[in-house]
């Protein structure tokens, strides 16, 4: 990438928040991925807005990164700008029965804030290893709850640089999708609407879900969570298991023996290992059951 483009970002953020050729394996829960041309760490929503303005002017590809929990980055890395919206943009504020949080706030942090304020309704998200921004984009869910159940509104940045606040009823939230995803908006912050509850009951429910997650999911290995979307009328993990693929390996990537819906990095997996394994799984499930498995994991870079 041209030095003058890097310099523009340095002038905005300072040299210490502009990393060159940053390995993406440091920033994904898969612990996989080559280097990004530039890795930017904005500290305010205004800086995010200005970064995207520079990317538009310079025609530079860009990608918004939370904590990289649903992402497979190519072994070749990313030819463009990664904009990290994580703990650096993770402010959480409780106001009555509402919680306002920036896009980089961890769902676990929001769930803890809700618990401490005796607010119920967000327990389902306490163990999802992602940020609010990504969760709103894909209408994340677990254990019977979804973001659309608790979201009041989201503030987004359009590709033209305009800031919009959109109420939940206009976000078109469906299974792992929303208008934010389809329109290519960037989530800046969101407001959740919860309800008063009993703190000990909230705490107990979160503990119960945490224990369930630990007992059923291969949390001891790097992964991107559920690898495939749930096909209508089926469970992806069961289809994969019934296809005889429990423990199936390609290089360092493996279908988890603990939960077949997870592809894990056993220690030295490449992105290509994971991609090939996923394709093998898709082909076998299609051959055996005529069901098409769609990836829930997002791919970034060239494969």
Image: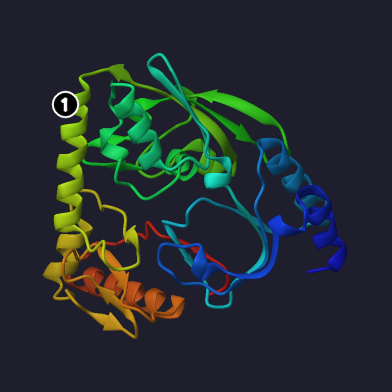
Vertical relation: 258 (above or below) 207: below
Q: Position of residue 239 (x, y in %)?
A: 17, 63
Screen quadrant of the N terminus = bottom right
- The residue positioned 14% from the left and 68% from the top of the image is 241
Question: What kind of colouring is applied to the model shown?
Answer: rainbow
The number of numbered badges drawn on the structure is 1
- The residue positioned 21% from the left and 59% from the top of the image is 217
Q: Is residue 75 left or right of residue 78?
A: left
- The residue positioned 60% from the left and 40% from the top of the image is 185
Q: Position of residue 157 (x, y in %)?
A: 65, 36
Vertical relation: 171 (above or below) 226: above
Q: Residue furthest bottom?
A: 251
Q: Position of residue 37 (x, y in %)?
A: 69, 68
Q: Residues within 10 Å of mark 1 (few under 14, many from 20)?
A: few
Q: Is residue 277 left or right of residue 22?
A: left
Q: Residue furthest right?
A: 4
Which element type, helix, strand or loop, lies under badge 1? helix
From the image, tell me which residue sits under label 1. Answer: 201
Residue in the foreground of this view, choosing between 249 and 5 = 5
Residue in the foreground of this view, choosing between 23 and 257 = 23
- The residue positioned 34% from the left and 34% from the top of the image is 111
Residue 59, quarter of picture: bottom right
Residue 99, quarter of picture: top left
Q: Position of residue 20 (x, y in %)?
A: 70, 68
Vertical relation: 236 (above or below) 179: below
């Amino acid at each position: 990438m041209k030095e003058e483009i890097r310099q523009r970002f340095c002038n905005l953020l300072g040299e210490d928040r502009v990393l060159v050729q940053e390995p993406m394996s440091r920033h994904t829960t898969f612990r996989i991925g080559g280097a990004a041309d530039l890795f930017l760490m904005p500290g305010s929503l205004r800086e995010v807005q200005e970064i995207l303005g520079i990317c538009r002017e310079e025609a530079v590809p860009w990608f918004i990164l939370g904590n990289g929990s649903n992402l497979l980055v190519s072994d070749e890395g990313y030819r463009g700008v990664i904009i990290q919206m994580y703990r650096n943009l993770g402010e959480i504020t409780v106001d009555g029965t509402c919680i306002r949080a920036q896009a980089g706030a961890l769902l676990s942090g929001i769930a803890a804030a809700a618990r401490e304020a005796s607010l119920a309704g967000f327990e389902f998200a306490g163990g999802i290893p992602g940020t609010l921004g990504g969760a709103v984009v894909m209408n994340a869910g677990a254990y019977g709850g979804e973001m659309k159940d608790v979201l009041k509104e989201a503030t987004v940045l359009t590709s033209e640089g305009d800031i919009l606040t959109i109420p939940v009823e206009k976000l078109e939230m469906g299974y792992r999708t929303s208008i934010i995803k389809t329109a290519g908006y960037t989530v800046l912050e969101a407001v959740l609407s919860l309800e008063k509850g009993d703190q000990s009951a909230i705490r107990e429910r979160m503990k119960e879900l945490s224990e369930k997650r630990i007992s059923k999911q291969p949390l001891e290995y790097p992964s991107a969570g559920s690898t495939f979307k749930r096909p209508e009328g089926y469970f992806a993990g069961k289809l994969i298991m019934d296809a005889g693929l429990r423990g199936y390996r390609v290089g360092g990537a493996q279908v988890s023996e603990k939960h077949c819906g997870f592809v894990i990095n056993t220690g030295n997996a490449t992105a290509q290992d994971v991609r090939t394994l996923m394709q093998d799984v898709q082909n076998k499930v299609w051959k055996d059951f005529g069901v098409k498995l769609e990836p829930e994991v997002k791919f970034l870079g060239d494969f």
